Image (cartoon, rainbow, N blue to C red):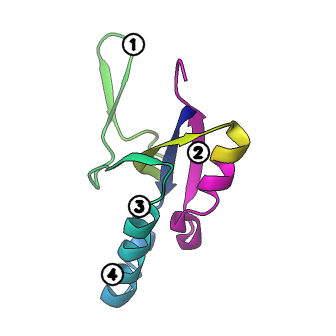
Amino acid sequence: MAQFLLMLYDNPADWMKLSPEEMQKALEKYMAWGKGPYYKQGIRLAADAGKVLRGKSRATDGPYSETKEVLGGFYAIEAASYEEAVAIAGTHPHLEYGGAIEVRKSWGA
């Protein structure tokens, strides 16, 4: 089995529109999804934009100042092929909440 990263992108402001009950329901869906047999690890990133390094001494805020969508976290999964990894990613509740998922095969996998 190969390993893939599912990188979750969204606009953090969209989450602020959910009621506490809706947020709890979303959290429960994410937690349930992470119990699948393909799941290896998941990491949620802090709610800041981070820093980007370019060249030797230039650091800027966020990935790009003009974008609203940021990388919020990722999952490591196992799948037999890209097609299977994409099918697994397609079941993630992140897509229900307007997010995007980038699927990438791990190096050496």
Which mark is first along the chain, 3 or 2?
A: 3
Decide which of 45, 105 is in the foreground and name it: 105
Q: Secondary structure at mark 2?
A: strand
- Judge whether 89 appears above or below 63 on screen: below
The span picked out in magenta is: 86-109
Judging by the rendered image, the residue that carries numbered circle 1 is 55
Is any part of residue 103 visible from this angle? yes
- Res. 105 image quadrant: top right
The C terminus sits in image quarter: top right
Nearest to viewer (mark 4 / mark 3): 3
User: Could you classify mark 2 by the number of other residues whose Cα lies within 10 Å: few (under 14), some (14-19), or many (20 or more)?
Assistant: few
32 left or right of 78 in image = left
- The percent coordinates of residue 38 (x first, y second) are 51, 49
Judging by the rendered image, the residue that carries numbered circle 3 is 35
Nearest to viewer (mark 1 / mark 2): 2
Which mark is first along the chain, 2 or 4?
A: 4
Which mark is first along the chain, 3 or 4?
A: 4
